[in-house]
């Protein structure tokens, strides 16, 4: 089965300003990398616009209405907090993030694809139920997990997050449901300051792997192998969702975890193995962070190439 790539030009229209690290050029770099002949067999689809029913799977109606009402004139931005801004194109971009992630779930659940990657922005894993933060407006992957639960009737859904920043929003949205599992490796101390190993959810359905700055490849791989992967196997999910952030790369300007491009291929291989053991191979990956353009492009290419090799 093929790998589906979901994206949309509207995701380029979220523009928080020329000096903001979460810039449209991030997605341009990713899509340029995926235009290489190595990726010619990707099944490319447009990310649809999410409707309110999808958003309400993780956010209250009042919050949704507040965010959807923020539509500044072209060339202007509205600042929601110190890091999170909205431009004229932000609403559609964020809706296509959620729609693309949920369409990716549908693609693997109905057998259209073995795996799917949503190349969308803005990221989503910091957004809480009623609070935008950390560049994020809606909890994209958390909504996709709830969509898998509500539409497809799945009883065990796992979200894993290897972004260098803890996915506080995803954890908060899922941790009280024993049908959900959330695991994150992340630099600590680092934004947003959450993700202690002591945060374990309900009966261990949350696993956090905080790593100190400068940890590098060996500590990252050992932490996953010794802590997260065994817990994930014990949970035995029916679907695996990945918050794929690439800002743990040694070239990234926002953190200092010091991973290499090959580490993202390695962690993708481990995710594939889990999906093959427990999920009938069903794996959905959604772009989160990564702020050095060259490192982001190379890391996404390694991630998607590994997904394609598995489904060839």
Image (cartoon, rainbow, N blue to C red):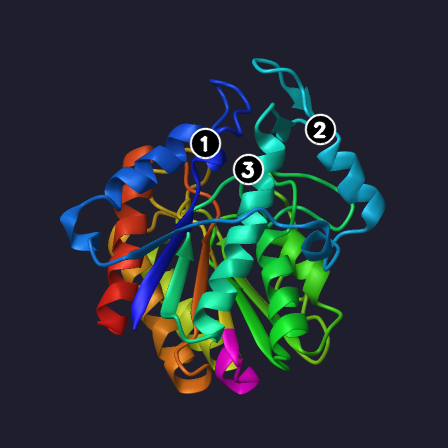
Q: Is residue 75 above or below residue 41?
A: above
Residue 220 is tagged as none
Q: Is residue 101 one of those drawn in magenta?
A: no
Local packing at callout 1 (Cα closer than 10 Å; few below 14, some 14-19, many 20+) is many
Secondary structure category for the residue under label 3: helix
| Label 3 neighbour load within 10 Å: few <14, some 14-19, many 20+ | many
Q: Residue furthest left?
A: 37
Relative horizontal placement of residue 98, taking residue 279 as reference (left or right): right
Query: Could you tell me how far apart the alpha carbons at marks 2 and 3 are, in whole angstroms?
Result: 16 Å
Name the residue at 45% across, 67% down: 107
Q: Comparing marks 2 and 3, which lies closer to the viewer? A: 3
Which residue, given by chain and number where applicable, does mark 1 sit on? 12
Q: Are marks 1 and 3 in contact (CB under 8 Å)?
A: yes
- Quadrant of image for the N terminus: bottom left
Residue 233 covered by magenta stretch: yes
Does the rendering let one see residue 68? yes
Q: Which mark is residue 93?
A: 3
Q: Which residue is mark 2?
A: 80
Residue 250: x, y in percent?
A: 33, 43
Could you tell me which residue is drawn at 20 percent across and 53 percent down?
40
Residue drawn at x 59%, y 41% is 94
At x 59% / y 31%, what residue is drawn? 90
Q: CA distance from mark 1 to mark 2?
A: 19 Å
Distance from Cα at disc 1 to Cα at disc 3: 7 Å
Within the image, what quadrant is residue 155 found in? Answer: bottom right
Q: In the image shown, does 119 or 175 lie closer to the viewer?
A: 119
Mark 1 lies on a secondary structure that is helix
Whichever of callouts 2 and 3 sits on the residue coming sooner in the sequence is 2
């Amino acid at each position: 089965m093929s790998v589906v790539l979901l994206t949309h030009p509207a995701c380029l229209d979220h523009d928080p300003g020329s000096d903001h690290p979460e810039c449209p050029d991030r997605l341009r770099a990713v899509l340029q990398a995926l235009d290489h002949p190595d990726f010619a067999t990707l099944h490319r689809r447009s990310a649809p616009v999410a409707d309110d029913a999808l958003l309400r799977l993780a956010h209250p109606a009042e919050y949704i209405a507040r965010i959807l009402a923020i539509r500044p004139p072209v060339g202007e931005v509205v600042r929601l907090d110190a890091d999170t801004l909205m431009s004229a194109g932000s609403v559609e971009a964020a809706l296509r993030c959620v729609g693309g992630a949920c369409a990716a779930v549908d693609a693997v659940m109905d057998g259209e694809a073995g795996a799917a990657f949503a190349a969308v922005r803005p990221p989503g894993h910091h957004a809480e139920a009623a609070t935008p933060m950390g560049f994020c407006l809606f909890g994209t992957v958390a909504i996709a997990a709830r969509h898998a639960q509500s539409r497809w009737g799945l009883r065990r859904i796992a979200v894993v997050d290897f972004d260098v920043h803890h996915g506080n929003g995803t954890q908060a949205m899922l941790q009280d449901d024993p049908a959900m599992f959330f695991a994150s490796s992340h630099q600590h101390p680092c934004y947003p300051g959450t993700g202690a190993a002591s945060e374990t959810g309900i009966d261990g359905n949350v696993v956090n792997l905080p790593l100190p700055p400068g940890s590098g490849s060996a500590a990252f791989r050992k932490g996953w192998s010794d802590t997260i992967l065994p817990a994930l196997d014990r949970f035995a999910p029916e679907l695996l969702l990945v918050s794929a952030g690439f800002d743990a790369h040694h070239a990234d300007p926002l953190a200092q975890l010091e991973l290499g491009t090959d580490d993202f291929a390695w962690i993708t291989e481990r995710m594939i193995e889990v999906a093959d053991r427990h999920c009938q191979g069903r794996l959905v990956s959604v772009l989160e962070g990564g702020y050095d353009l060259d490192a982001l492009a190379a890391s996404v290419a390694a991630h998607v190439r590994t997904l394609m090799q598995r489904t060839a």
